[in-house]
Amino acid sequence: MRDNNSSPCCGAAARRRTVLKALGLTGACAATLAGCGPADGGFSDEVAAGKDGGVPLAEIAENSARVVAFGKERVVVVRGSGDEVHGLSAYCTHQGCVVAASGDNLTCPCHHSTFETATGKATGGPAKAPLPPVKLSVSNGVVQLA
Ligand code: FES
């Protein structure tokens, strides 16, 4: 049985997220305040979708991945060559912190779980389940949630 309060990061962060959610503070503000933000490496390379709900494909280099904020939802956009993309949930399957993209791996800043960028498969740390896929589409050079 998992004890959500045992972690100095996400136990407290989860409690803060609950409070922030109750206050109606969600998205980037709440996530940053939740304690797993840029200082932990969680959002250092995040990009936000525009008012049209999409992010230009040019924001994600070929053969790389980047965490994108589609409104309140964080998605790892994995780009191959050209406009070939697929998405993974950016929320760690251990306790829900937002992962960071770096090279061939996605790393959780909270307890250092790692995931394969290509597949979302858990490869290390306490997370055992893969990052679930997220459907994306590309239209006119813009990536959006499908
Ligand atoms: S939340 Fe614990 S490893 Fe990601």
Image: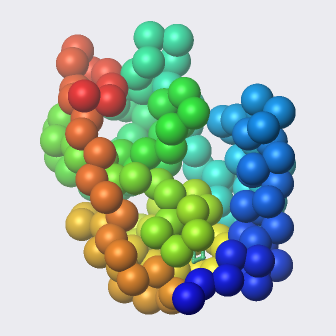
Q: Is residue 7 above or below residue 81?
A: below
User: What is the tally of numbered marks visible in this picture?
Assistant: 0
Depth order, front residue of 91/104: 91
Which residue sits furthest top? 52
Query: What quarter of the picture does the N terminus occupy?
Result: bottom right
Quarter of the picture for ligand 1?
A: bottom right
Give the image location of residue 18, x and y in percent: 75, 50
Q: Is residue 143 above or below residue 44?
A: above
What residue sits 48% from the left and 31% below the top? 70
What residue sits 34% from the left and 53% below the top? 88
Describe residue 17's horizontal placement relative to residue 106 as left or right.
Answer: right
What residue sits 66% from the left and 53% below the top? 44
Which residue sits furthest front? 1
Query: What quarter of the picture does the C terminus occupy?
Result: top left
Give the image location of residue 52, x and y in percent: 44, 11
Give the image location of residue 45, x and y in percent: 59, 49
- Residue 18 visible from this viewpoint: yes
Depth order, front residue of 115/22: 22
Q: Is residue 65 above or below residue 114?
A: above
Q: Is residue 138 above or below residue 50?
A: below
- Residue 29 visible from this viewpoint: no
Depth order, front residue of 120/103: 120
Give the image location of residue 21, x and y in percent: 73, 39
Depth order, front residue of 23/144: 23
Colour basis: rainbow
Describe residue 56's horizontal placement relative to residue 101 as left or right.
Answer: left
What residue sits 46% from the left and 69% below the top? 93
